Each structure stands twice: as structure tokens, then as C-alpha cells.
């Protein structure tokens, strides 16, 4: 029995040394893979899981603090493939850097597998990606039994006003999740992944469901009163007949394993299906 316990413990030990994550999607994936014990630092906006929020911060995913990362002497740094100088600076310091891409659902699933492979956990990565894909397929199958509802998802907006609005459009993984959940994104044919949209356009489109996290992208500390005030903004516009839901949750902005949770919540908001 003691041998079995030791054997199980060995399989749970971190496969990699000290790891630094520079984005919430990377952090959530590392913890989902069982590598949380190896994570030495995370980005400013890494809130989940709670253990990650307590770790040292090394800046944002757009501007990681190279000096702070180097001081940690990590064995591996994961960084999103964005235009910045951090990758070259870290590599010149002799640190192993793995760059990752996020995008549509399949790209995000490949990111999970890439993280696992780089951390010597390829089988765990394949299993996690398969589970996410399977659960998304199950949600899509359940949605097909219902009539789809038209949706606009607002992800940017002037605080307190229905102005300066930015919504989910073509090419975003969120557009895919809306479809999986039984929605028809009215901006799915837009030229941009996150197009601007006016109040006049919303009146013209008449979405059946409006999901708004426009001034709540920084999800920590958002109150229920704030959410109610956002919903009241839409209710006050009698010319728009759709029902509005205010949301403030990282599941809608982090393209990691919790895409499944986002799809389930979309399904609840759009179709009224309990999670």
C-alpha cells in the first residue's frame, strides 16, 4: 500500500520546474493540468483559481515585467504571441520561453495541448482538450432541440451610458460559444472580431437577448447593484424589446478550459436552460 501511495504521489509531482504564466488563460490551463504547484508567478489579471490570485504578479499579458520574471529565475515562461519585446529579452537571459496563440475554439484547445507538451504532460493536455471538446459538443447537442435566439454580446461600453459600445463579432471564440449555446449572433458576419456598434444599430437589429459586460471587463469587485443598473439602462430604452443580462465573470474573457462554463452560462442566458 505504501508503494502505491508513493507511486501515485510521484505521478502528481510537477513535471516542470518553476513556471511563470503571463496571461489568465495560461494560468487557468496550468492549474487545470495539475501544474499549479509549479507556478511561481502570474499576470496581474489572473484571478482563478483562488490559489493563483495569491501568487506574485509580473505585469499584464500585454506588458510583462521582464526584470521581475528574470529575478524569479524560472525554468519556463509561457507568453502569448503578441507584439512586444519581452520574448527576445527573456530568451537573451537564457530563460526557456514558449509562445502561445489564442483565437477560435480549436486554437484555444491547441493552446492547452501545447502548454501540457512543453511542461512534459502531453497526455494530460490531450485528455483536458478532449474533455472540453466533448462537453462543448454535448452543450451544442442540447441546444439544437430549442429554437435559436438572436444575440448581441457587448464587451465594451462607456460606463453608465449606451455609447462607445463594442460587441462580439466574426472570428471570436465567443461567437462560437454563443452558437454552441443556442444563440445566433447578429454580428457574426461583421468584418471585425470585435466591431463597434451604435445604439441606433441595436434598435435596428432588435436582438432577443442582450448580454452586457461592457463596463465590467475588470470583473473583480463588481456588485449586484452595478449589474442591475446596467440592465436598467437597457430597460429604459423601450424601443429595444430584447431582454438584457449584465454579466461580470472571467469565464467570458479567458479563452482557457473554462470555455465550457462560459458556454453553459450562455445557454442559460439565451435559452433559459439551467446549468
Image (spheres, rainbow, N blue to C red):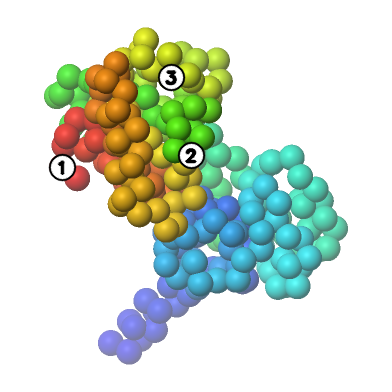
Q: Can I make out residue 131 in this image?
A: no
Residue closest to the eye, 86 or 117: 86
| 247 shown above or below 117 | above
Q: Secondary structure at mark 1?
A: loop
Q: First in sequence: mark 2 or mark 3?
A: 2
State the separation of the CA atoms marked 2 and 1: 30 Å
**Would you say 170 lies left or right of 92 here?**
left
Label placed on residue 199: 3
- Tag 1–tag 3 contact (CB < 8 Å): no
Residue matched to label 1: 274
**Would you say 187 lies left or right of 192 here?**
left
Residue lying at 29% horizontally and 43% vertically, measured from the top left? 228
Q: Quadrant of the C terminus?
A: top left
Q: First in sequence: mark 1 or mark 3?
A: 3
| 200 shown above or below 156 | above
Q: Quadrant of the N terminus?
A: bottom left
Give the farthest residue toward the bottom.
Answer: 2
Residue closest to the eye, 199 or 102: 199
Circle 2 Cα neighbour tier, 10 Å, few/some/many (<14 / 14–19 / ≥20):
few
Residue 142 point in image, percent of width and height: 18, 31
Q: Can I make out residue 22 in this image?
A: yes
Residue matched to label 2: 159
Residue 171 point in image, percent of width and height: 50, 24
State the separation of the CA atoms marked 1 and 3: 30 Å
Q: Secondary structure at mark 3?
A: helix
Residue closest to the eye, 98 or 158: 158
Amino acid at each position: 500500500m505504501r508503494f502505491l501511495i508513493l507511486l501515485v504521489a510521484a505521478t502528481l509531482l510537477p513535471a516542470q520546474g518553476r513556471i511563470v504564466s503571463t496571461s489568465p488563460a495560461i494560468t487557468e490551463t496550468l492549474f487545470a493540468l495539475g501544474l499549479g504547484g509549479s507556478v511561481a508567478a502570474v499576470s496581474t489579471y489572473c484571478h482563478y483559481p483562488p490559489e493563483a490570485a495569491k501568487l506574485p504578479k509580473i505585469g499584464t499579458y500585454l506588458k510583462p515585467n521582464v526584470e521581475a520574471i528574470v529575478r524569479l529565475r524560472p525554468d519556463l515562461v509561457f507568453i502569448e504571441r503578441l507584439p512586444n519585446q519581452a520574448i527576445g529579452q527573456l530568451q537573451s537571459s537564457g530563460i526557456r520561453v514558449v509562445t502561445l496563440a489564442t483565437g477560435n475554439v480549436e486554437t484555444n484547445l491547441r493552446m492547452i495541448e501545447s502548454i501540457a507538451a512543453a511542461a512534459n504532460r502531453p497526455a494530460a493536455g490531450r485528455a483536458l482538450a478532449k474533455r472540453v471538446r466533448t462537453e462543448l459538443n454535448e452543450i451544442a447537442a442540447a441546444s439544437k432541440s430549442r429554437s435559436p435566439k438572436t444575440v448581441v454580446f457587448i464587451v465594451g461600453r462607456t460606463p453608465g451610458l449606451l455609447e462607445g459600445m463594442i460587441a462580439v463579432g466574426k472570428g471570436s471564440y465567443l461567437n462560437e460559444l454563443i452558437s454552441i449555446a443556442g444563440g445566433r449572433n447578429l454580428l457574426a458576419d461583421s468584418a471585425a472580431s470585435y466591431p463597434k456598434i451604435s445604439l441606433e444599430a441595436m434598435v435596428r437589429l432588435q436582438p432577443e437577448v442582450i448580454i452586457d459586460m461592457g463596463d465590467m471587463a475588470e470583473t473583480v469587485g463588481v456588485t449586484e447593484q452595478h449589474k442591475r443598473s446596467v440592465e436598467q439602462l437597457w430597460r429604459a430604452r423601450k424601443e429595444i424589446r430584447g431582454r438584457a443580462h449584465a454579466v461580470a465573470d472571467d469565464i467570458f474573457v479567458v479563452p482557457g478550459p473554462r470555455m465550457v462554463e462560459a458556454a453553459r452560462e450562455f445557454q442559460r442566458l439565451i435559452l433559459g436552460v439551467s446549468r
